[in-house]
Amino acid sequence: MKLRDLSIKRKIVYLYLPIAIVPMLFFAVVSMKIYESAFINRSLESMEDNNVLISNRIDSILSDAEGSATYLTLSINRILNSNEFAGVLRNDIKLYNLISNELTYAKLIYKQIDSIAFIDKDNRLYYSDYSLQKGKMGILVSPMLTKLKKTTGNSVWFELKARDYITTDPDRKMLTVGKKIWNINSGETIGYLFVNVSESVFTSLFEEQVASYSIYDSENQMLLTSSLNKSEVSNINQFLLEVDHSSKIIKTETNRILVSKTQIDKLKWRLLSEADLDLFTQDLSNIILLVIILLITIISLEITMTLTLNRLITSPILKLKKGAEEISKGNFKFKFNMKTNDEIGLLAQSFNDMSDQVNQLLNDVEREEHKKREYELALIQQQIKPHFLYNTLDIILKLSQMGQARKAQMVTRKLAEYYRNSLSGGADIVSIKNEIKMTEDYLELQKLRYSDVFDYDIMISEKICKVAIPKLSLQPIVENAIEHGFVDKQVKGSIKIYDRISEVEGKIEIIVEDNGAGIDQEKLLGLNQLMDNTKPSSEIIEVKSFGLRNVNHRLKLFFGEDSGIKIETKNGVYTRIIIRLCQEVEVDTND
């Protein structure tokens, strides 16, 4: 038996259950995959961010060490070149104390510094900590001092390692920056500075972190690590050192490891971090279990609801089907008799209301069509006014008699363009761009007639140029402004046409504003009531309102009742006609 021949009851069972359940299963599986992928990506990004943060802190520590060396270079020069010592380095207890105090003060300023030692050219040792003096002989014969003597005063970093000279603890690794100090006045060598940074400063950055961190030098030798299992960390990080990825997931026999790498350029170090992915995904397993329970519950409810729907919906639907067939035959007097107040009952009542509304709508459409034809006839009569054509032809004749043939040609061309655009191939709806062009042609012709009466300015944004508007919506408004707005004005008139767009409400407004005589408040109230269809037209007796009513009615017919014209004015100051377009419809135009 074909599916279409099955009863509604069987169709609900055969179609509804798979459609309801399969997408949920698919959604659950895909969601878990997407969530897991997103979780892993966020974990990798978090590790990378932590690596960058720690590497920035390491850079700050290194910069502090170099900064302390620079500071001490200036301080020792200041002491030595004072009037008391005149740049001469000698075995003087006061000089010795001053330099030693500067070393101690620098250590207090730069909190990350472990200790500071200074050896002058006569091999006298100055120190910030008393324990540094134990390694004096060691530093004098060390390769560190030998290397430093060959430099020109730039900072030199020595590897992080444990030493038994110039260190507070021979069992702790120290990172040392050395610097040859010159006399800035004479250019002679004063001595050699050593600034120590303890390994504990770096390992403290790894505390209270979920991941394990390690630092490798440029030769891939591990310098520091926060992990207790150094051999395992070494194997994982060694693998990462050989690839170019900044972060990666490494699968081992027992788990998956998140690893990430960051460069510390100042010392060509690499900071590597690793964390067990399973520790991060424990909550994900709980979520998956919860989703499975929810799916089982939802599937059970779907089956129960399917059986209930078969009993409650099938019978009322059959009644609706029979009634809809009667209405489709044109029997709008048919009425459903449903005793229920559920959705089916409401739908039946809606059918009853629809029958009544269709009859009413047919009558309304007939009346609106008749009314529309009346306004269209009035529009045609307004489009080509004999007195406007006569006045323009009279201007052309006078220009020809005055020998201004070029200007007469321009007026003739403008007149032809105006009537060509106003006809628009018979189209009732044009683009705003076309409407603006038509209005501009009209204004140019009127300026030839009223050259000293008014100026105009059109500011319409490109984004609304293709939006549809009933033809000749602007010209009657502009004509009102010229013929009624500037009659009693002593100053030169101005007409502005611009737009406003409401991004939130999706409305477009085109404003025609003039600085004419304005409208008194009583007439303004009546006109706005007329535009909103809240006042009979017979109460407005002025002929000048006909053009506005024509435009307002056509706007409402095309865009809906929320569209139309609103008038704002201040008597003797300005009049602002606002055209509201509440639906943004574009026309297919080649303008």
Image (cartoon, rainbow, N blue to C red):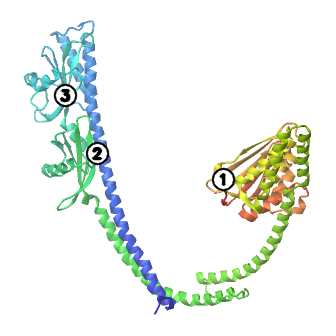
Q: Which residue is mark 2?
A: 51
Of the two numbered discs 3 and 1 in the rendering, the one whose residue sits closer to the viewer: 1
Residue at 14% x, 30% y is 168
Could you say which is closer to the camera, residue 546 or residue 100?
Answer: 546
Q: Nearer the viewer, residue 342 or 494?
A: 494
Residue at 80% of width from left, 47% of height from top?
414
Residue occupied by mark 1: 464
Callout 2: SS: helix
- Mark 1 Cα within 10 Å, few/some/many (few <14, many 20+)? some
Relative to residue 67, is residue 48 depicted above or below? below
Disc 3 is placed on an element classified as strand
- Residue shown at the point (23%, 8%) measured from the top left: 87
Q: Is residue 413 above or below residue 96?
A: below
Image vertical order of residue 162 relative to residue 363, above or below: above
Q: In the rendered view, does 485 fall on the left or right side of 107?
A: right
Is the residue under label 1 in contact with that under label 3 (CB below 8 Å)?
no
Residue 156: percent from the left, percent from the top?
20, 27
Q: How far is disc 3 from disc 1 in space, using C-alphas?
A: 72 Å
Compare marks 2 and 3 and give the one earlier in the sequence: 2
Instruction: For mark 1, give the secondary structure.
Output: helix
The amino acid sitting under disc 3 is Ser
Residue 292 at x, y percent in the picture: 34, 73
Q: Nearer the viewer, mark 2 or mark 1?
A: 1
Horizontal placement of 6 versus 497: left or right? left
Instruction: Kindly indicate the quadrant of the structure image that contains residue 138.
Output: top left
Q: Amino acid at mark 1?
A: Ile
Q: Decide which of tag 3 and tag 1 comes sooner along the chain.
A: 3
Q: Residue furthest bottom?
A: 1
Type of amino acid under label 2: Asn
Query: How many numbered circles does the render carry?
Result: 3
Return the residue at label 3: 115
